[in-house]
Image (cartoon, coloured by chain):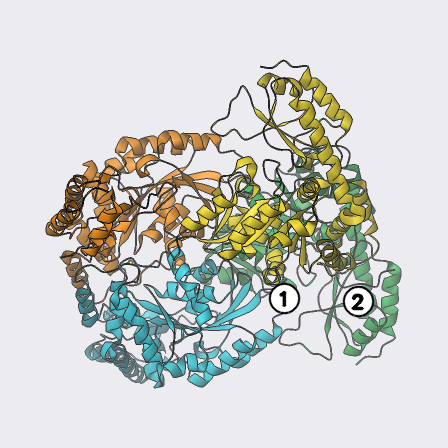
Chain colours: A cyan, B orange, C green, D yellow
Amino acid sequence: MSRNFRSDNVAGVHPAIIRAIEAANGGPAMPYGNDAITKRLEKRFAEMFETELAVFPVATGTAANALSLAAMTPPWGAIYCHADSHVLMDECNAPEFYASGARLAPLPGEHGKLAPKTLEAALKSAPPGVHHAQPAAVTISQLSEAGTAYAPDHVAALAKLAHARGLGLHMDGARFANALVGLGCSPADITWRAGVDILSFGATKNGALAAEAIVVFRKDLAETLGFRRKRAGHLFSKMRFLSAQIEAYLTGDLWLKNARHANAQAQRIAEGLGAAPGVRIAHPVDGNEVFAEMPAAMAKALEEAGFALEPWAGGPDFDPKRPLMRLVAAFDTDPKSVDALIAAARKQKAA
Amino acid sequence: MSRNFRSDNVAGVHPAIIRAIEAANGGPAMPYGNDAITKRLEKRFAEMFETELAVFPVATGTAANALSLAAMTPPWGAIYCHADSHVLMDECNAPEFYASGARLAPLPGEHGKLAPKTLEAALKSAPPGVHHAQPAAVTISQLSEAGTAYAPDHVAALAKLAHARGLGLHMDGARFANALVGLGCSPADITWRAGVDILSFGATKNGALAAEAIVVFRKDLAETLGFRRKRAGHLFSKMRFLSAQIEAYLTGDLWLKNARHANAQAQRIAEGLGAAPGVRIAHPVDGNEVFAEMPAAMAKALEEAGFALEPWAGGPDFDPKRPLMRLVAAFDTDPKSVDALIAAARKQKAA
Amino acid sequence: MSRNFRSDNVAGVHPAIIRAIEAANGGPAMPYGNDAITKRLEKRFAEMFETELAVFPVATGTAANALSLAAMTPPWGAIYCHADSHVLMDECNAPEFYASGARLAPLPGEHGKLAPKTLEAALKSAPPGVHHAQPAAVTISQLSEAGTAYAPDHVAALAKLAHARGLGLHMDGARFANALVGLGCSPADITWRAGVDILSFGATKNGALAAEAIVVFRKDLAETLGFRRKRAGHLFSKMRFLSAQIEAYLTGDLWLKNARHANAQAQRIAEGLGAAPGVRIAHPVDGNEVFAEMPAAMAKALEEAGFALEPWAGGPDFDPKRPLMRLVAAFDTDPKSVDALIAAARKQKAA
Amino acid sequence: MSRNFRSDNVAGVHPAIIRAIEAANGGPAMPYGNDAITKRLEKRFAEMFETELAVFPVATGTAANALSLAAMTPPWGAIYCHADSHVLMDECNAPEFYASGARLAPLPGEHGKLAPKTLEAALKSAPPGVHHAQPAAVTISQLSEAGTAYAPDHVAALAKLAHARGLGLHMDGARFANALVGLGCSPADITWRAGVDILSFGATKNGALAAEAIVVFRKDLAETLGFRRKRAGHLFSKMRFLSAQIEAYLTGDLWLKNARHANAQAQRIAEGLGAAPGVRIAHPVDGNEVFAEMPAAMAKALEEAGFALEPWAGGPDFDPKRPLMRLVAAFDTDPKSVDALIAAARKQKAA
């Protein structure tokens, strides 16, 4: 029974996805995505998203994000993102690398989300002309780095501002399923209908081995992605095994079931931990992540009890006496381990 | 019974490697290579290569090659390679991308191999000074694009020239196992003992799902690779499943057994096909690839009989009446399908 | 009599520098910096800076800055700079381009200057490891974008922090002469003695036609610059005409005389304008730039009277009723035009 | 009296161009190309080339070439060039740098020129698909590296092949004036009318201080060049002094007069030297460059007599007994020095 709540990427692979990999292993298949499974994938996504689109499977979220942003940004472009976003903080300049030296332009925002008025002000103050990085794209995350979700109208408001200025809108959907389940809307509503141009459709964190899909809703943006993926070394020769993961992930709504389970456990954590002495849940729990500010003694006690939590980035107003801890539930999180965690936390006194 | 001889990447995954992926799926594990399996890998490689080294698993050969070359080349550098090499012909400028605009410098060579005297002449005629791309690296392939293998003394001769001028030597080992078995030498003899600085250790073509290992024999060249891999999006969060493939690939000499089988089938093809009317085997068969020049009628007949062969790059002296066809045997090639192929070929008359 | 106070780059070329270009035009000379004048330059700089160094003349400040930063930053590096700095705001991603996708990391600071404690906090909160951009360099400007100068002890404090973490320190000296004159210290004191590793030594704004010098105080950082300059197209074939400008600029302390004149006029503007009704001088006037917050009516009146002022970047707390205007004095600014400006301003009533 | 025949870049600046720089030095002017002289330039070029176009002045030929090629090539593109071309051999990977890792694809050709049939074969054998660098541009030089000129019909034949495949055609006109005078056609005939999309219009080698103009005949290709130039640090703040050089260069056909003089001296050299014992003129003399194969003793004697000649790149069939020497005449080459050179050569006996 795992007591590891550091991240959903410590989880393994869902058995159904392992079985799909085995099933894909019957005899020869055309390489580089010319296999039957990969060919089926685009149709499957088109049905799910209720629109024409292009799909490019890759193995990591950083590849999906960097390739997507490079497709919508010239080298002299600026990509607006949240100041805490994964593309800015955790991808080692991959976006700058893939976009030939384009720039990420961080913006602040409560609970990890970019507010339309903040983007509007940034666009308004961005000077035109060759001396300055030119606004080229906006990227937002589902879930955000604070575990919150963007509602369709929020996305639409950002998209309207972006498109009015000719910028593309990218959504980093590393936890897309968790956001979708939390929002209770359709894949189409939260993406292209709200104005998203490219989506990094994440599967790895929610049960796949290593599989993400770049989903392109704007035909013109899809033209270069095949070349970009290959020259980056992200085109698999035995692509069928990448596509098989994604296909199994979608089959029988496995992806949504996994997300529902993870989100439910996160709620359970938030409620249980939130009621513990001296704990403050720092952000709305829209998906499978809980950010809890707790007494240092409690954090220490939980660690000693074998629970792994992620100490979250300090920042200027960090109080060592009340660290902010991240707890992430996964598709395979055992409710018993959640209960054990809560019980251990409640044993503590408030600091 | 597969009749597909186009490439070894049409093959599936060896059952033992699938089982290893399943076995790695027990409970949580630290992400990004901090898991137990990945930690074991470096030791395993050190034993196999009889030296200290650093290992960086990635999922594709293009990633392994481009990252390796970037680690030994400044942006104003020139990387000497064979004019038919995969890095030059089949990786869509990935080396140039990863090396920030460095250049590949193609050199001719019989049977896909770079001759020391050719490299020597190229180095001699390369002008010093800021106006010109500066020689920075040499890359060779095991097997070469002609299916031939470099013997240790050949590699050593190239390494001596490269190192004398301060260049690094990279080996693209996409078919390293097939070369090794063909040469009958040790991994150490054909790599660092002969002067190789970085090896792209291929596993995918020989039975893995998607796994290659960058093996670095020079400590200084390993320092930047962790950052290069991450910023390129090639660092897997669930790394254990990449490492597990490689571990299983090495366990019980699976990699060598697979290569022996494939090479034996290639010999069988070469002998059988070579005896067929009007067929000329174009290159020595050192591994699992056969290049056969045959009457167009024979190529057509084989295709009609359901055999898939790869028409090889035309070039100036291409004779449509006698196409050059590539046949590749894999770890799972059925001898019966080889016999069937030979029988079908022998039915043909010489053109 | 010029009434243009928008920038010192609207000024022409000092006659002595034009004459030097003519003088350099006698007969043939070796190209690409192998001429006599360029060869003299390094010695001249070494004397002036009282140390061994390397000099690379280029034609623009953006080239000097981008080349300098690229020489001290890996592609996965972060370059700390002030949030208003020219490298960040006015060079169209040139640093990111030259440094192969490295990143600029903006930090706030009063009056355009980076405070040691701000840098210290940024370095402290920068996480190690391959997931994150790694601190690689710090760049500061003399004068800063607010027209202020860094004192030697201030530079030394920043250098100490940078070097302790292995970062290089770059100084953008677009207005180096103006800062030096304002500080009243020696070139050595404000650069290498305070820990500066590379200086962009500006001449264009202070009387040259188009000439800057990259002055490298750390031998190891100079090794790649010759190649970087050439591959960027910044190595002049008729280099003597670039070097001649710089030589004349230094001869007889022309550069210091020009700067003293410009700074004196800036003081005259600050005092005169500062006494005008409703005017607030926003930053200390350490060099040749004055930032004056004034009633919109005054700004309008000055414009109508033929005076060109630069409306300075709005920003969030911008008050259209009291715009912030930049006035820059140059080596050729006529005191009479300054008096005329002041008189015109004083005619206005406070808003 | 200069005896230096190594290159036309050893020459100085034409007095009329120096005077134009002085004349441009009256009072303030708007920076970055917003001055009156620069604004006049585009109109002047439009008249000269009899068509609408866009002009971007820069200071070096490498900048002009690299910026032009980057504007027509994606990072996964291949740029066809002659195997001896300056962009390939003498620009230190600048094209690869500016084009974000695109590749130069060298092709052979007699007398430094690319034959249509060679380009046709290369395009025919270039495989489509994401695995391979995609043909994106063709670049040719006027004069070529062998001192020869492309006639309009030759350029048109190359352009037809390039455009049929969607490639852009770039002309490196480092010695455009010399080629034009040699061909005796109009600027329009040898450029856009023949299918050239972008021209690097050289002035430096033919009398300017440091000035080239990127002349764009295809509107869509001009859109990004302003940003590319700035982010490369090639946008001059005091642009008027760059534009003034070009304006003076064109005024009163100075550029053509200079070229006629240089070409005439080259003819004089070719005839005189060609008649000397044991000398073979290796290439047609279409402009201001002469390539003479001569006895080593003669080369030595000329050097001892104070004449500077450029030993030309050895290559495989280089015969040290009969070195190939390049002699270049410039706008200021003194006929007396040519006669002295010929006389000195004729004193020699054949080897």
For the point 67% across and 19% down, the residue is D345
Chain identity of mark 2? C
Q: Split into 4 quadrants, where in the image is the N terminus of chain A?
A: bottom left
The answer, for residue C69, to whether it is visible in the render is no
At x 47%, y 82%, the residue is A156
Q: Quadrant of the C terminus of chain A?
A: bottom left
Q: Is residue A301 above or below residue B335?
A: below
> Is residue B133 visible in this depiction of the protein?
yes
Q: Does mark 2 fall on the same chain as mark 1? A: yes
Q: Which mark is residue C110?
A: 1
Percent position (x, y) of residue B263?
17, 43
Q: CA distance from mark 1 to mark 2?
A: 26 Å
- Tag on residue D124? none
Q: Quarter-wise, where is residue D225 in the image?
A: bottom right
Query: Left or right: where does residue D178 sit relative to residue B126?
Result: right
Between residues B278 and D180, which one lies in front from this camera angle?
B278
- Give the amino acid type for the residue marked by disc 1 in the picture: Glu
Residue D203 relative to residue C270: left or right: left
Mark closest to the chain's N terminus, 1 or 2:
1
Q: Amino acid at mark 2?
A: Ala
Query: Residue under circle 2?
Result: C308
